[in-house]
Image (cartoon, grey):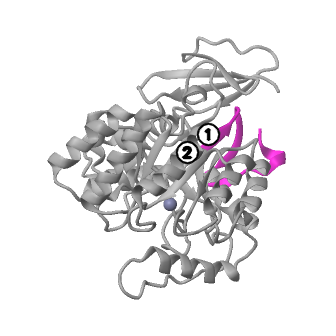
Amino acid sequence: MADTLFKNARMADGRAIDLLVAGGRITAIEPVGRLPVLEGTSVVELAGALLVPPFVEGHIHLDTSFIGDSWRPHKPCTDGFDVRERVAFQEENLATAAPMDYRAARQVDLCLAAGTLRMRSHVHVDAGPGLSHLEKILPVRETYRDLIDIQLVAFPQNGILSSPGSVEILDEAIAMGCDVIGGLDPATLDRDIEGQLDVVFDIAERRGVGVDIHLHDPHMLGVFQIEQICDRTRALGMQGRVAVSHAYGLGEVSEAAAKKAADLIAASGVAIMTNAPGNHPFPPVALLRAAGVTVFSGSDNIRDSWWPYGDGDMLNRANMIGYRSGFYTDPDLEAAFDVVTAAGAAALGISGDYGIAIGKPADFVCLAAEHVPEAVVGVPRQRTVYRRGRTIAENFVLASPANRG
Ligand SMILES: [Zn+2]
């Protein structure tokens, strides 16, 4: 692959730079005009575009979206939100859906086109579907390996103890290639906090994988379980490898209780994922970050049986997080951006190969924005996505394989 010199980019810190890519990695970053154009080097003029690392989609469900399929009108629960009823609606919808690998691929395309090159997807694995979803999603990950790095979470949507036979299936899912073991509402779904966490952390310890638990359980019931997760994380030395997704309880308790929990979460190296959901209380992002907690984000459900929203654009997600968090100052807007970029990489444990620096993979997004705060507020449509120094999408349109240059 020929070297490529990207000229006249603006970094997030305001520097005007040229950037050299060789062998798919960043080999030099210098003030504009300092790098010589050697023979055989192709030149890309960026005309002052803002150059940022690719977005990190930290929580998505590739197996259940209807992107690429027909529209499925949302069906409300009959008597308030009920996980089991929603799962039943999902089963109904999936029974008549387009093939899972096709739908998953369309969802990956959607995310790629917006600038996401790192992703963590939960995949429904338990005694319900068994390993059938995973068997469809693993080849999709393989197909897209050159374009996007995807982690898969073995996600027990039906619970673990309340779905007999799931323990062995979850264990097998890790053996098949899942990177992370999931969990879901140990208290309200399994009605056995210790029991579910025993299974999850036992698999994590034996298989050497991370943990990412969906936790919608409310108020202090949620916070209590976060404390249990923190204690187990520290006891097993798993700091930096455990995440709690949603953690709604943190947004429902008093500020003093949230602050106390935040200090424990930070000290335990547990990350918190929020997608700033609709009208639901969600974790206090600024309070958590001030305590040193890694807060990351994801689209979660996109056009599936849970809700119809989501466009796969993590910059738009940063906008939602900022909007719902009351972020107005430039540092606040930069924090919202960090949640969908560097903090996401930290939560996924992939910071080593992430960022705009010499030696890193040449994965980046160029945005029509003056700086990060403007990008978060304006969510520019005008953007170009580069993977290993090659253009893979422009203005939300994916380049065909022949045109990736
Ligand atoms: Zn989810």
Q: Mark 1 points at which residue?
A: 206
- Decide if residue 222 is in sight here: yes
Answer with left or right where residue 340 lies relative to residue 252.
Answer: right
Q: Does the magenta stretch include residue 391?
A: yes
Q: Measured along the vertical axis of the image, is residue 235 above or below residue 87? A: above
97 on left or right of 323: right
Q: What residue type is labelled 2?
A: Asp
Q: How far apart are marks 1 and 2 (CA)?
A: 6 Å
As displayed, is residue 204 above or below residue 97?
above
Could you tell whether 336 is left or right of 124 in the image? left
In the image, 184 versus 364, the foreground residue is: 184
Q: In this view, does 31 lie to the left or right of 327?
A: right
Q: Residue at x 71, y 15 (%)?
A: 37
Total number of numbered labels? Answer: 2
Q: Mark 1 touching mark 2, by CB under 8 A?
A: yes
Q: Does the magenta portion include 16?
A: no
Categorize mark 1 by other alpha carbons within 10 Å: few (<14), some (14-19), many (20+).
Answer: few
User: What residue is shown at x 15% (from left), y 46% (from top)?
Assistant: 256
- Residue at 53% in and 21% down: 17
Quadrant where the C terminus is found in the figure: top right
Judge the density around disc 2: few (<14), some (14-19), many (≥20) Cα neighbours within 10 Å: some
Image disc number at residue 64 = none
- Identity, as a three-letter code, of the amino acid under mark 1: Arg
For label 1, the SS is helix
Q: Residue 320 falls in which quadrant of the image?
A: bottom left
Task: Give the extent of the magenta segment.
Answer: 384-405
- The location of residue 86, given as percent across then percent down, is 50, 77
User: Residue 150: where, in percent of width, then height?
Assistant: 65, 46
In which quarter of the view is residue 8 placed?
top right
Q: Which mark is residue 202?
A: 2
